[in-house]
Image: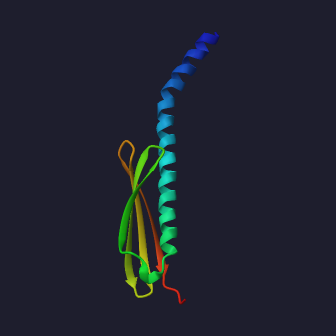
Amino acid sequence: MAFGVLVPIVVVAVGIFPFAHVLNRQAWDTSAAFDIARTEIEQLRATAFDDLPASGSFTEEHRGTVFTCTATVTKKNSLLKKVTVKVTWQLKKTESLQLDTLLAKTSQ
């Protein structure tokens, strides 16, 4: 009786483990990409409005995954700029995450 119950449990566990591993890896990578994008936006927010670069990119590695981060700053008007930060990485296919924000010029 116990053997009859144990075999299906083992078969299900062996079938689910690879799928669960991929989901866990995807979650870790997405979390890392979000942290990279958030940090880049925070650094750009700390930059003087008139000194914001038009664009820039860099790569970072976390837990064996290489992330490419590209930031683009677009002038909307004399007091407002749009910042787009896109992070891409390779899992089974190219994955990406994008954050957008607006930065306003403040009087100093």
Image position of 72 with respect to 24: above or below: below
Closer-to-camera residue (43/79): 43
Name the residue furthest right.
2
At a point 37% along the width and 76% down the height, the residue shown is 74
Which quadrant would the N terminus be assigned to in this image? top right
Q: Quadrant of residue 73?
A: bottom left
Q: Quadrant of residue 60?
A: bottom left
Closer-to-camera residue (3/76): 76
| Picture mark count | 0
Image position of 6 with respect to 80: above or below: above
Q: Position of residue 65 (x, y in %)?
A: 43, 46
At a point 51% along the width and 74% down the height, the residue shown is 45
Q: Give the image's coloring scheme.
A: rainbow
At a point 39% along the width and 44% down the height, the residue shown is 91
Q: Position of residue 34 (x, y in %)?
A: 50, 57
From the viewer's perspective, is 54 left or right of 11?
left
At a point 55% along the width and 20% down the height, the residue shown is 10
Which quadrant would the C terminus be assigned to in this image? bottom right
Q: Position of residue 44 (x, y in %)?
A: 47, 72
Q: Position of residue 7 (x, y in %)?
A: 55, 15
Image position of 102 with respect to 66: above or below: below
Name the residue furthest bottom.
107
From the viewer's perspective, is 76 left or right of 17?
left
